[in-house]
Image: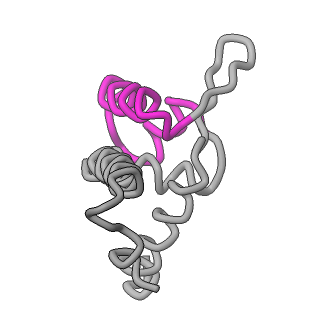
Amino acid sequence: MQQADMISATDPEPLEDFRCQARKASDFLKALSHETRLLILCTLNDGEKTVSELEGSLGLQQAVVSQQLARLRADDLVKTRREGRQVFYRIGDPNVRLVVDALYQGFCASKGA
């Protein structure tokens, strides 16, 4: 059965649920649509990193990395772990890992990156 077949104009509850999920997916994709945020997530896909590790591996300034991490954190896409004075960032949503893996396969793996 197609997804659209499950939604009936006569029963507004499934339609509202479907709209809610579409809204969540749209917000998720908006968060991924920034080049720097996507680079950060691709790097975090290999495991947790500190801001300075991300800064070094991506060649970005600390302020840029921190700003984009704040957005990813607000969108609940990354989680943190504190160890002393250092904060480690990791992917916090399994859907992020799935999407980042798919993007890597589609855009990077075949290009030798």
Quadrant in which the C terminus is drawn = bottom left
112 to 7, vertically: above or below: below
Q: Position of residue 101 (x, y in %)?
A: 52, 69
89 to 81, vertically: above or below: below
State the residue at coordinates (33%, 75%).
4
Q: Position of 11 compared to 109: left or right?
A: left
| Residue 34 appears in the rendering | yes
Q: Position of residue 27 (x, y in %)?
A: 31, 45
Magenta-span inclusion, residue 82? no
State the residue at coordinates (33%, 38%).
60
Q: Position of residue 28 (x, y in %)?
A: 37, 48
For residue 103, what is the image quadrant?
bottom left
Q: Position of residue 88 (x, y in %)?
A: 63, 30
State the residue at coordinates (40%, 25%).
70
Q: Position of 67 compared to 88: left or right?
A: left
For residue 46, what is the image quadrant?
bottom right
100 to 77, vertically: above or below: below
Q: Which residues are magenta?
A: 49-78
